[in-house]
Amino acid sequence: MNKRTAFDYDIEKVLGISCEELKPWAVYTFDWGTAVKHEKGEWDSIFIDAMKIDVSALDVEIRDAGILIKGKKGD
């Protein structure tokens, strides 16, 4: 179990949400755009120019050369 600190309570007060609700994300930049991946390894979103594409429900491979969409997760 994680021990809660005074910092956790300060963040919760400022943001208005629990620190447990914060999600650890990593942002990757490619020539074609940007992709956001959850720390656990699941891709979440892709940004191409000003367009956001939600890929959280899709089975995707993201590469330097582009995006391969294999279908929906679980299919």
Image (cartoon, helix red, strand yellow):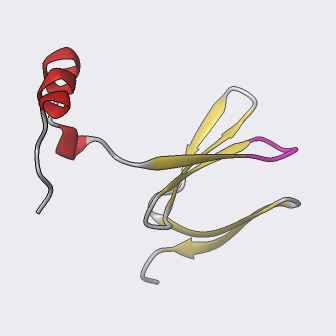
- Position of 8 with respect to 71 (left or right) is left
Quarter of the image where one finds residue 70: bottom right
Q: Nearer the viewer, residue 18 or 50?
A: 18
Magenta run includes residue 50: no
Looking at the picture, how far across and down is residue 4, in whole percent?
11, 43
Q: Nearer the viewer, residue 63 or 15?
A: 15
Q: Nearer the viewer, residue 40 or 31?
A: 40
Q: Which residue lies at the image location 46% right of the left edge and 59% below the top edge? A: 39
- Position of 20 with respect to 64 (left or right) is left
Query: What is the chief secondary structure element of the magenta stretch?
Result: loop
- Is 23 above or below relative to 7? below
- Is 49 above or below relative to 66? above
Q: Nearer the viewer, residue 4 or 75?
A: 4
Q: Quadrant of the N terminus?
A: bottom left
Looking at the image, the residue that sits furthest to the top is: 14
What are the residue bounds of the magenta stretch? 29-33
Q: Which residue lies at the image location 46% right of the left edge and 84% below the top edge? A: 75
Looking at the image, the residue that sits furthest to the bottom is: 75
Looking at the picture, how far across and down is residue 8, in whole percent?
17, 33
- Position of 19 with respect to 54 (left or right) is left
- Is 29 above or below relative to 66? above
Looking at the picture, how far across and down is residue 64, in whole percent?
85, 59
Q: Which residue lies at the image location 55% right of the left edge and 49% below the top edge? A: 26
Q: Which residue lies at the image location 58% right of the left edge and 44% below the top edge? A: 53
